[in-house]
Amino acid sequence: ADIVGAKNRHDGYYEGNGYQVTWTFGHLCTLKEPHEYTDSWKQWTLRSLPMIPTRFGIKLISDRGIEKQFGIIESLMSNAEAVINCGDAGQEGELIQRWVMQKAACKCPVYRLWISSLTEEAIREGFQNLKPQTEFDSLYFAGLSRAIGDWLLGMNATRLYTLKYGQNRQVLSIGRVQTPTLALIVNRQLEIEHFVPQPYWELKTLYRETTFAVTKGKFQTEAEGKEFLQKIEGFPFTVTDITTKQGKEAPPRLFDLTSLQVECNKKFSFSAENTLKIIQSLYEKKVTTYPRVDTTFLSDDIYPKVPGIMSALTAYTTLTALFSTGKIPKSKKVFDNSKVTDHHAIIPTNVKATNLTGEEQKVYDLVARRFIAAFYPDCIVSNTVVLGEVNQIEFKATGKQILSPGWRTVFGKEENNEESESTLPAFTKGETGPHTPSLAEKWTQPPKPYTEATLLRAMETAGKSVEDEELRDALKENGIGRPSTRAAIIETLFKR
C-alpha cells in the first residue's frame, strides 16, 4: 500500500493515488462439503460412495471475520477498472486469490505481481513487470487439481475407513499426504520391533597409535575371527602402500525450505512447523527471501544483486571482506535458471537485519552463512589410504587432512569438526614394527526411529520405496506433500 501510494486507512483496505489495497488472510474460500452438493451425501453410508460431484463448487469459510473481509473485497472489485493479484507467488497463493476473485464475480482485467522478496526494491521492480493473469493459468489449474484430488481421496476414503473400521467410535482420517507419511512411520516402527540383532566380530590392530581394520570386513562367527587373530599374533606389522589423493569439497548448497527445516531440527531441535514460522517472520521483516521453496539454486538475474546483499551483511564483514575487492564468482552450482521454476533458494536480502528475536537470529545466521559460503572457494583436502599387512592379512586405515579450508572458514569450529577425520602420522612404505591386535564382538543395530528431520527427508524422497516404475518416476521429482505443507502434515498427525 505504501509503495503504490495508498496511504489512507479504511476499514479492511487502504486507498490513495488511484489504488485500493485490500487483503485476504489464509484461505477465505474452500471446496464445498459433500452435503452441500446433495442431501443424500449428508449421511455417512457405504452405498453413497464414491461421492464424485459433476462440478466442484467453492464456498466462503463460515467465519464472521472472513465474511466481513470478503464483503469488502467484493464491493471494491465490483467498482474496479483492473485488479492486481499480489498473492503469494506459488501454487497455493494463486489458488487462494483466484477462488476469492471467482466468488466475488470479478469481471475486470487482472494482472499478476510476482515477487520473491518483500523489500521495497523488489516490490517496485515487480510493479514495473506486471503480467496478465492468463500467464499463470497452468499454475492455478495445478493448485485446483491438487485441491480436487485431496477432496476426492480425503472425503471418500475417510468415510470408507471410518464406516468399515471405526467401530462407530472414531473418525479415521485418510489423506493424500498424511496417510503415506503415517505409513512411513508405522513401517519403520515395525522394522524396529521385528529386528533380530545378529552378532558379528571385527578385527582391528593398533600400529603407531593408528587403528587399522582388516580389509576382509566383518566375521560372522567368533571362530573365524579367532582364526585370523591367531594368524597375526606375534608377527610384525608392515606398511605396504600409501596413496594420497587431493580432493575438492564444494560449498554446501543454498537452502530450500526442507533443508533449512532439517538443519534447524538437527542443530536447534526446532520442529519443522516452528522453523517455517520463524523463516516466514524473517521474510515479513524483509531480511530473507520467500521461504516456501523447493530449489537450492538462484536465477541469473540475482547475480548483479549479490554485492548489495553482501554489503548489507554488516555482522559478517570479516567473512564478506573477501569479496569487497575482487569480482564475485558465478558458478553453475549456485546460478542455474533451469533449476528455478517460480522461486529461487532462500537467501538474505539487502535489508540490514535488526530487531530479531533470539530464534530468528539463529535461523538468519544459518541462511546468511550458507549464502556467504556459496561464493567461497572449494575446500581442498588430501585423502590418505594406508595399507599394511601382517602375515599376508591385509589391513587399511584412512585419514583426511584439510590443506586449504576455503568455504569452511565461514562456519564455526563445531561445524567443521564433525567431518574432519583423523590426520594420520607420516608413514613410509616398507616400515615395520609391533602392533596390538584386538577382536571385538559387535551387534547389528535396528534402524533408528524417524526424527522430524529424517521424516522430512523421507517425505521428500518418498518415491524410493515404490516398486512400480512409472509411479516411482512420478514421485521422483516431488516426493509427497509440498515443502510448504509438510510441516503442517506432521503437526496434524501429532494432533490426531
Image (cartoon, rainbow, N blue to C red):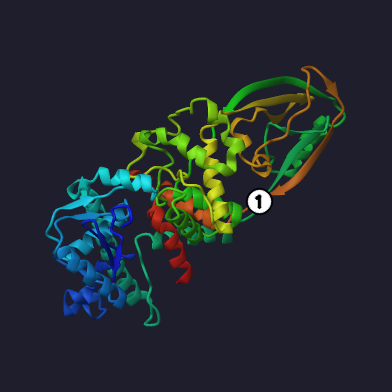
Locate the C terminus and report the quarter of the image it occupies. bottom left
> x and y percent of residue 393 in the render?
74, 27
Taking the spot 47% from the left edge, 51% from the top edge, the residue there is 458
Q: Nearer the viewer, residue 313 or 437?
A: 313
Side (left or right) of 59 relative to 327: left
Where residue 14 sits: x, y (%)? Answer: 28, 63
Name the spot of residue 263 as percent of width and height, x first.
Answer: 55, 49
Instruction: Identify the residue position indicated by label 1 in the image.
Output: 198
Report helix, strand or loop for mark 1: loop
Out of 178 and 354, give the one closest to the viewer: 354
Residue type of the residue flagged with mark 1: Gln
Say if 143 sits above or below 218 in the image: below
- Left or right, residue 54 beside residue 261: left
Instruction: Look at 56% across and 48% down and name the residue there.
Output: 365
The answer to which quarter of the image holds residue 218 is top right
One can see residue 252 in this view: no
Q: Residues within 10 Å of mark 1 (few under 14, many from 20)?
A: few
Residue at 79%, 34% in the rendered image: 205
* Residue 424 in view of the camera: yes
